Image: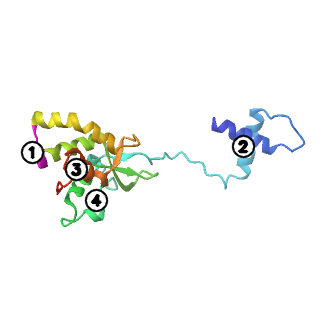
């Protein structure tokens, strides 16, 4: 549809002002091809896919061999003296965004499945919930916690929001996350 409007606009622009007849699509295509042929250095057409909006999953690191995807933890969370909770979220659960060319962009996100898996671990380690009690707690409180943080309903939240997410889920704003 965009191509049609672009052709129509080009056809209109190609007509002298005093002429009012419409061009056929074939005539417009011929003019576009002629214009493109003369000005092809100005137009870059590419068949390369756009990978922005795609994500690397945590388990994809190291699979592609030399030159493949390797997850690099954000520098401020990479050392043992840094925020160990955030490092765990990035290294064990988060998705990493891709640039247009498919390379990692260093932006980490949690989808609902990753957040649920991380929440299960936190409930076990910090609230000592396991088995049916943890399952019931997640069934009861996870959906409303997810909805509270995914306010735009994008299906993803920034990994940096996971400490607040876990404290909200556990109803413990003072909970120490390590």
Label pair 1/3, CB-CB below 8 angstroms: no
Q: Secondary structure at mark 2?
A: helix
Q: CA distance from mark 1 to mark 4?
A: 28 Å
Give the residue number, with chain letter if any, for mark 2: 33
Q: Kindly identify which residue carries mark 4.
A: 73
Residue 128, numbered label = 1
> Would you say the residues marked 4 and 3 are in contact, meaning their CB atoms lie under 8 Å apart?
no
Q: Which residues are magenta?
A: 124-130
Which image quarter holds the C terminus? bottom left
Residue drawn at (68%, 52%) of the image: 40
In percent of the image, x 28 and y 36: which residue is there? 143
Whether label 2 touches label 1, CB < 8 Å? no
Residue appearing at x 24%, y 41% in the figure: 116
Looking at the rendered image, the quarter that the N terminus falls into is top right
Give the number of the mark in front: 3 or 2. Answer: 3
Give the quarter of the image for residue 151. Answer: top left
Q: Is residue 14 above or below residue 174?
A: above
Query: Which of the two marks, 2 or 1, is nearer to us in this view?
Result: 1
Percent x, y of residue 28: 75, 38
Marks 4 and 2 in Cβ contact (< 8 Å): no
Q: CA distance from mark 1 to mark 3?
A: 15 Å
- Cα distance in 3D space between marks 4 and 3: 23 Å
Please tell me whether mark 3 sits on a helix, a strand or a loop: helix
- Could you tell which of marks 4 and 2 lies nearer the N-terminus? 2
For disc 2, the neighbor class at 10 Å (few under 14, some 14 to 19, many from 20) is few
**The quadrant where residue 15 appears:** top right
């Amino acid at each position: 549809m965009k191509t049609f409007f672009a052709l129509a606009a080009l056809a209109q622009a190609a007509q002298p002002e005093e002429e009012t007849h419409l061009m056929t699509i074939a005539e417009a295509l011929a003019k576009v091809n002629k214009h493109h042929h003369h000005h092809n250095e100005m137009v870059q057409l590419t068949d390369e896919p756009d990978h922005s909006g795609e994500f690397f999953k945590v388990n994809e690191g190291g699979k592609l061999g030399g030159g493949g995807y390797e997850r690099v933890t954000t520098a401020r969370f990479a050392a043992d003296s840094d925020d160990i909770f955030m490092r765990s979220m990035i290294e064990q659960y988060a998705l990493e965004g891709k640039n247009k060319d498919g390379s990692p962009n260093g932006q980490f996100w949690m989808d609902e499945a990753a957040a649920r898996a991380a929440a299960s671990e936190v409930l076990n380690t910090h609230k000592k919930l396991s088995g049916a009690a943890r399952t019931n707690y997640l069934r009861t409180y996870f959906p409303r916690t997810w909805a509270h943080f995914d306010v735009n309903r994008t299906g993803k939240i920034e990994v940096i929001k996971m400490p607040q997410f876990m404290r909200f889920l556990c109803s413990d704003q003072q909970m120490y996350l390590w």
